[in-house]
C-alpha cells in the first residue's frame, strides 16, 4: 500500500551558502520525530552530493530528489531512527 | 568509536579561516569527532572582538578585501565563526588553543572567544589527533 507522503517540515535554504542547507537539514532532522518526512530546498550546487552523502552516512532515507527549476533542488528525507 | 578529523589552523587570513570553518562544519556533519588546534595567526583570529576585526587576505589576494566583503554580503555568505558555531551545534567539535602562542603574545584564555574550549600543549593535540584525518591550514 502506498502511504501518502506528508511533509512534516519544509526548509527553504535557497541562497544559503555551502554547507548551510545541509546544516539546516541536520538540525531539523534532530528535532523531528522518527518517521517524519522533511523537505529542504537548496540552490547550493554542492548539496546534490552533500545531502545524499549525509543521509547515507546518518542512515536516514532519501525519499526523493526533485528539480524545482533553475539550480534549485528539493530533497525529501525520512528520519528513520 | 567515531572516526576522527583534526585540523591545525595556523593561518589567520580570512580565506583560510573560511576554508577551515567550512571543512570543520562538513566533518562535524559527517559524524567525525573533530579536534581543532589553533596556533599563531589562527589563534589570534579567535580573540574576543573578532566581529570587528578587518578582513585579512594573503599576498596573492591582496587588494581583494573590499570586493570579498561585498560579495559575502551580497551572497549572504556567513562569517567563518558562524560555521564553527554551527559545527559545534551539529557535531562533536573541540576547539583548542596552543599554550605556546598564548604565552608568546601574553594572552589568557579569557582573551579568547568562549568557543575555544581549552588551552593545551602540542603533545595533547597529537594524542587527540591519533588516527585522525589531519590537515594543516
Image (cartoon, coloured by chain):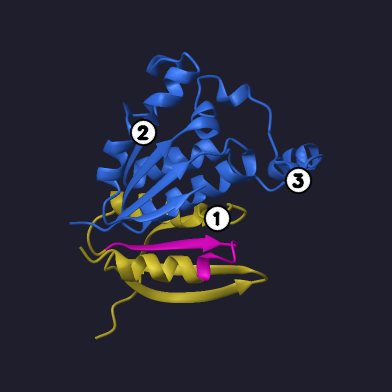
The chain letter for the residue carrying disc 3 is: B
Residue ID for mark 2: B96
The chain letter for the residue carrying disc 2 is: B
Q: Colour of chain B?
A: blue
Question: Circle 3 sits in a helix, a strand or a loop, which is it?
Answer: helix
In this rendering, the answer to whether A19 lies above or below B96 is below
> Closer to the camera, B23 or A64?
B23
Pointer 3 and pointer 1 on the same chain: no
- Distance from disc 2 to disc 3, alpha carbons, whole Å, reads 28 Å
Is B58 situated left or right of B34 in this image?
A: right
The chain letter for the residue carrying disc 1 is: A
Residue ID for mark 1: A18
The spot of residue B122 in percent (x, y) is: 34, 36
Pointer 2 and pointer 3 on the same chain: yes
Mark 1 neighbour density, 10 Å: few (under 14) some (14–19) many (20 or more)? many
Mark 2 neighbour density, 10 Å: few (under 14) some (14–19) many (20 or more)? many
Question: Circle 1 sits in a helix, a strand or a loop, which is it?
Answer: loop
Q: Nearer the viewer, mark 2 or mark 1?
A: 2
Contact (Cβ within 8 Å) of mark 2 with mark 3 = no
Amino acid at each position: 500500500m502506498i502511504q501518502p507522503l506528508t511533509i512534516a517540515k519544509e526548509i527553504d535554504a535557497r541562497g544559503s551558502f555551502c554547507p548551510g542547507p545541509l546544516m539546516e537539514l541536520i538540525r531539523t532532522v534532530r528535532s523531528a520525530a522518527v518517521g517524519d518526512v522533511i523537505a529542504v530546498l537548496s540552490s547550493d550546487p554542492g548539496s546534490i552530493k552533500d545531502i545524499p552523502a549525509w543521509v547515507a552516512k546518518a542512515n536516514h532515507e532519501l525519499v526523493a530528489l526533485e528539480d524545482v527549476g533553475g539550480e534549485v533542488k528539493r530533497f525529501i528525507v525520512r528520519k528513520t531512527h | 568509536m567515531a572516526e576522527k578529523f583534526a585540523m591545525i589552523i595556523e593561518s589567520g587570513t580570512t580565506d583560510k579561516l573560511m576554508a577551515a570553518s567550512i571543512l570543520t562544519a562538513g566533518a562535524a556533519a559527517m559524524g567525525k569527532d573533530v579536534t581543532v588546534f589553533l596556533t599563531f595567526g589562527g589563534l589570534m583570529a579567535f580573540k574576543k572582538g573578532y566581529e570587528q576585526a578587518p578582513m585579512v587576505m594573503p599576498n596573492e589576494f591582496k587588494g581583494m578585501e573590499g570586493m570579498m566583503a561585498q560579495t559575502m554580503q551580497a551572497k549572504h555568505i556567513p562569517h567563518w565563526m558562524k560555521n564553527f558555531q554551527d559545527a559545534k551545534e551539529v557535531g562533536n567539535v573541540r576547539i583548542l588553543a596552543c599554550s605556546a602562542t598564548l604565552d608568546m603574545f601574553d594572552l589568557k584564555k579569557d582573551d579568547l572567544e568562549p568557543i575555544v574550549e581549552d588551552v593545551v600543549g602540542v603533545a595533547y593535540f597529537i594524542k587527540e589527533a591519533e588516527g585522525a584525518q589531519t590537515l594543516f591550514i
